[in-house]
Amino acid sequence: LITVWNGRSMRMLTILRGHKGPVYCLKFSPIEDTLFSGSWDQHVLKWNLEDVYIEEKLAAETKTEQHDSIFSLDVNERYLITANEGKTIIVSDPVTLAQLNSVTTNRIGSLNSIAFISLERFVTGDQSGKLALWDIPQNRLVMTQPSKGNSPILTIDVNYCTTRIATGSGPLLILWEVDSFGQIHTFEGHEDTVWAVKFQSNVVLLSAGQDCTIRMWNCIELCPLTVLSAHEEQINTLSLLNNAQLLVSGSDDGSLRIWALTSPLLILRFFKTSFIINKLP
């Protein structure tokens, strides 16, 4: 299920039903009033949020009998990209969902995360701990870099203003430079796997994970800022609202918590559901 909330009043608007398995990724379109969702059921669904219906359906290509679950997706003005368990990246038109090209990533591990770094280039994080850079017009892998510790890269976020990438690799939060594709710094503090990273600004970076904490870091001075604790089980996802002044966190404990990123940090609202919250757009 996908639950749609009003970002200002925080009222639940509707529940979207269409997938036949857990939803692993969500992303709002930058050009339409639509939402993309990817699932264990090997499909990407495109939802028209104005009228709330399934607009298009995209089946993930699979060449094996295994379930190639869609673990991550991203979208910009020109392309929709999806990464699945079967090491396949599919590039599609975000309006029609027509497939433009695809590539099977035999040279790296199973894909966990994907994100655009520019209009025509994107990065992926895989199970073997490699960060890979891809070029869409050339339909090729440009380069790969191993992350410190070689733990699976489960989450990626990109700051376009500072051209930096943040990845979660095991308990480590790693900061990368886009142009050189090199590691700048490794933040240590989480006691277990990092499942979500998010740039709040050019200075502040957020991370959350299996240790049930949200941590704030200064990515200019490269130091920790504070630790937020409220969830009872692992935190799977983070999202920002109101010009990045509010933080929303979702967890295995079924709760959705909204934080004011001011001093002091406060929980503004708390919602309890009967299901695990895997992803926020």
Image: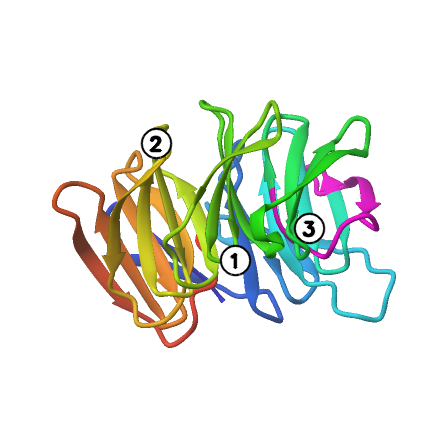
Which residue is under mark 2? 201
Pick the front one: 207 or 88: 207
Front disc: 3 or 1: 1
Whether 105 is drawn above or below 42: the answer is above
Which numbered circle lies on residue 83? 3
**Mark positioned earlier in the residue sequence (3 or 1):** 3
| C-alpha distance separating marks 2 and 1 | 24 Å
Residue type (three-letter) at the residue carrying disc 1: Gly
Magenta segment: 91-114
Pointer 3 with pointer 1, Cβ within 8 A = no
Which residue is under mark 1? 170
Query: Which residue shows up at 75% across the image and 56% down it?
Result: 60
Find residue 44 and report its image quarter: bottom right
Q: Secondary structure at mark 1?
A: loop
Query: Which residue shows up at 44% across the image and 63% down it?
Result: 192
**Dot 1, crowdedness within 10 Å: few (<14), some or many (≥20)?**
many
Residue 102 is one of the magenta-drawn residues = yes
Residue 249 is one of the magenta-drawn residues = no
Q: Point out residue 65 in the picture as x, y percentages from the top left corner.
A: 84, 71
Q: Point out residue 250 in the picture as x, y percentages from the top left corner.
A: 37, 61
Q: Point out residue 197 in the picture as x, y percentages from the top left corner.
A: 44, 47
**Mark positioned earlier in the residue sequence (2 or 1):** 1
**196 lies left or right of 225:** right
Residue at far bottom of view: 274
Residue type (three-letter) at the residue carrying disc 2: Ser
Colour setting: rainbow
Whether 201 is drawn above or below 17: the answer is above
Front disc: 2 or 1: 1
| C-alpha distance separating marks 3 and 1 | 20 Å
**Mark positioned earlier in the residue sequence (3 or 2):** 3
**104 lies left or right of 49:** right
Front disc: 3 or 2: 2
